[in-house]
């Protein structure tokens, strides 16, 4: 391969499902050691395009050519392509909770790649897995290597996926939203890690993302996709400085805007109030002592806050800071110490007694794919809350409520024929998150717990969803407990903010005061990393 020959040269790539073409003859190339970003909204088919290169798209017709070091990936026999996957071309998937096997530890899953692709012994692979976890910034890698996926935070699971993808030092890395689940400081660490590996080993990277800040900081060139078409491509600096296509300009201008009602009084009777809130988890003690008792890990250490009607409390911090644990305690899903009440009522051990509180407090989880049942239709998913809280509601009225909730989050029959009878796998990541938001809103809660509600959304849809949430708050007096690592989202949505680190609240106050004049060094680091 000469210096002028691309490592990967894609020509006239077309992908169809059931005779309907969704990727329309796109061309791009990646040189050795080059970083190309493929950017577009959810549904633009950027992920489908990348998966098609390794023929990982189920039931798709793929045409065109994808020459990798002179070999056409689209024509290789399956046995030869299997040897390429993982060793020469590796992939980081967007949703680690569904990509990782829940029955095996993350160490076993990383070691499996090393044993299959590099013929390492079990002991060598185990040591290498620990080193890879350490390289991706996971604390206590010797302990975390024995953890199962559900025992890691969202960001830690994504870093384990990255470690697995980098295990064989591939020539080309297909990174599908590799930092979606990571907080702002760890995004920088992961980008530095990928950049360092790319320079040391001459690795090329195809980055699929909707995060334009990530593109600006990481990529050499950018290709913009819209509805399966490649509408613009070029050097990153040139495209950002003078975008030629209207769609590219729309993406660049889609930073979250602050549109909340600033005049909501903070002194009203709170919807939720907590004092000395403490959450702990049992952990094993090594040695003989562990036979008789368990140790404890304190995830939330004496948190106190209140959320008045119509206001948003933002909670920001890195992965592992305890912010999602705080949210689960607020939802009554974890046992806790201290005081926590919702409209003057406390969570208790009796599920029937808690039923009334659960209607008042609804949740939107971080990962819509794992939080939506794959066996239920859209109508069943969104309307499920009505079956619980309004079981006597007639079917026509329930269906009408479902349709209205879907319309509120931007989903309708005109866009998706047969919408009510579709299943979650038929939607993009951003569209699935809108389904989750509709499900939470349909029972008319007073407080919505938003656990990273826009981390899986592209920038334009993120802006639309935040605008929708702001509008609903103004119209209905909704309160939000917003959990996020995105400082831009906090600045756009929150009235007040708490900054968490290692289970402690290190700074709290009005959001603009805290973000514009942070007193704590950790807060300053978060704000700087998010800019």
Image (cartoon, grey):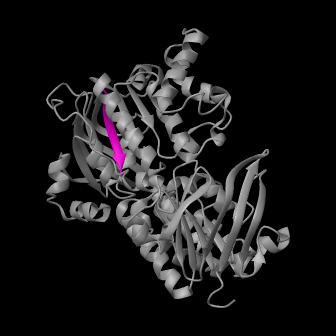
Where in the figure is residue 40, as x and y percent of width and height? 52, 55
Image quadrant where residue 239 sits: bottom left
Where in the figure is residue 268, as x and y percent of width and height? 17, 26
On screen, residue 163 versus residue 68, left or right, reads left
The residue at the point 21 percent across, 63 percent down is: 524
Q: Is residue 438 magenta?
A: no
Residue 401's place in the image compared with 420, above or below, is above
Residue found at the very far front of the displayed protein:
244
Foreground of the two, 113 or 190 = 190
On screen, residue 271 versus residue 365, left or right, reads left
Total numbered circles: 0
Residue 471 can be seen, yes or no: yes
Where in the figure is residue 477, as x and y percent of width and height? 28, 25
Q: In which quarter of the image is the N terminus?
A: bottom right
Foreground of the two, 120 or 480 = 480
Image quadrant where residue 333 sits: top left
Residue found at the very far bottom of the displayed protein:
2
Q: Which is the main secondary structure of the residues drawn in magenta? A: strand
The residue at the point 49 percent across, 72 percent down is: 221
Magenta region: 477-484
Q: Quadrant of the C terminus?
A: bottom left
Residue 384 can be seen, yes or no: no
Residue 34's place in the image compared with 365, above or below, is below
Image quadrant where residue 481 sits: top left
On screen, residue 264 versus residue 129, left or right, reads left
Q: Does the magenta stretch include residue 479?
A: yes
Foreground of the two, 357 or 268 = 268
The residue at the point 66 percent across, 76 percent down is: 8
Where in the figure is residue 36, as x and y percent of width and height? 53, 71
């Amino acid at each position: 391969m000469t210096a002028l020959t691309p490592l990967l040269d894609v020509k006239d790539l077309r992908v169809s499902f059931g005779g309907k073409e969704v990727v329309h003859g796109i061309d791009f190339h990646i040189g050795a050691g080059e970083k190309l970003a493929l950017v577009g909204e959810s549904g633009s088919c950027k992920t489908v395009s990348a998966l098609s290169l390794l023929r990982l798209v189920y039931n798709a017709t793929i045409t065109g050519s994808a020459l990798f070091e002179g070999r056409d990936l689209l024509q290789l026999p399956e046995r030869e392509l299997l040897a390429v996957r993982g060793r020469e071309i590796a992939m980081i998937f967007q949703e680690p909770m569904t990509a990782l096997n829940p029955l095996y530890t993350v160490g076993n899953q990383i070691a499996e790649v090393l044993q299959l692709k590099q013929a390492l012994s079990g002991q060598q692979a185990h040591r290498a897995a620990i080193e890879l976890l350490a390289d991706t910034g996971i604390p206590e890698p010797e302990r975390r290597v024995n953890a199962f996926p559900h025992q890691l935070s969202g960001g830690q699971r994504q870093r384990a996926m990255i470690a697995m993808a980098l295990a064989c030092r591939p020539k080309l890395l297909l990174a599908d939203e590799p930092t979606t689940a990571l907080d702002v400081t760890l995004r920088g660490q992961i980008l530095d890690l990928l950049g360092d590996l790319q320079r040391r080993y001459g690795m090329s990277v195809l980055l699929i993302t909707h995060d334009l800040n990530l593109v600006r900081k990481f990529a050499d060139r950018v290709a913009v996709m819209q509805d399966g078409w490649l509408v613009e491509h070029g050097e990153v600096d040139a495209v950002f400085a003078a975008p030629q296509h209207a769609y590219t300009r729309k993406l660049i201008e889609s930073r979250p805007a602050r549109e909340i009602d600033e005049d909501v009084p903070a002194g009203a009777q709170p919807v939720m109030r907590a004092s000395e809130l403490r959450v702990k988890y049992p952990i094993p003690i090594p040695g003989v002592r562990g036979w008789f008792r368990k140790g404890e890990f304190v995830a939330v250490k004496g948190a106190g806050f209140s959320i008045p009607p119509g206001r948003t409390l933002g909670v920001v911090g890195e992965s592992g800071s305890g912010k999602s644990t705080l949210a689960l305690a607020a939802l009554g899903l974890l046992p806790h110490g201290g005081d926590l009440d919702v409209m003057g009522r406390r969570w208790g051990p009796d599920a029937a007694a808690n039923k009334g509180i659960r209607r008042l407090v609804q949740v939107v989880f971080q990962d819509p794919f794992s939080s939506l049942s794959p066996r239920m239709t859209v109508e069943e998913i969104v309307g499920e809350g009505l079956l619980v809280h309004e079981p006597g509601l007639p079917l026509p009225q329930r269906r009408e409520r479902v349709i209205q909730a879907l319309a509120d989050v931007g989903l309708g029959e005109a866009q998706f024929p047969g919408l009510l009878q579709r299943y979650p796998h038929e939607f993009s990541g951003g569209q699935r998150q809108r389904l989750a938001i509709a499900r939470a809103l349909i029972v008319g809660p007073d407080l919505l717990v938003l656990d990273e509600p826009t981390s899986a959304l592209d920038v334009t849809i993120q802006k639309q969803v935040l605008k929708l949430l702001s509008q609903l708050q103004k119209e209905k007096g909704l309160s939000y407990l917003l959990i996020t690592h995105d400082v831009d989202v906090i600045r756009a949505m929150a009235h007040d903010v708490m900054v968490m680190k290692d289970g402690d609240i290190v700074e709290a106050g009005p959001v603009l005061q805290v973000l514009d004049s942070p007193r704590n060094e950790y807060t300053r680091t978060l704000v700087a990393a998010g800019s």
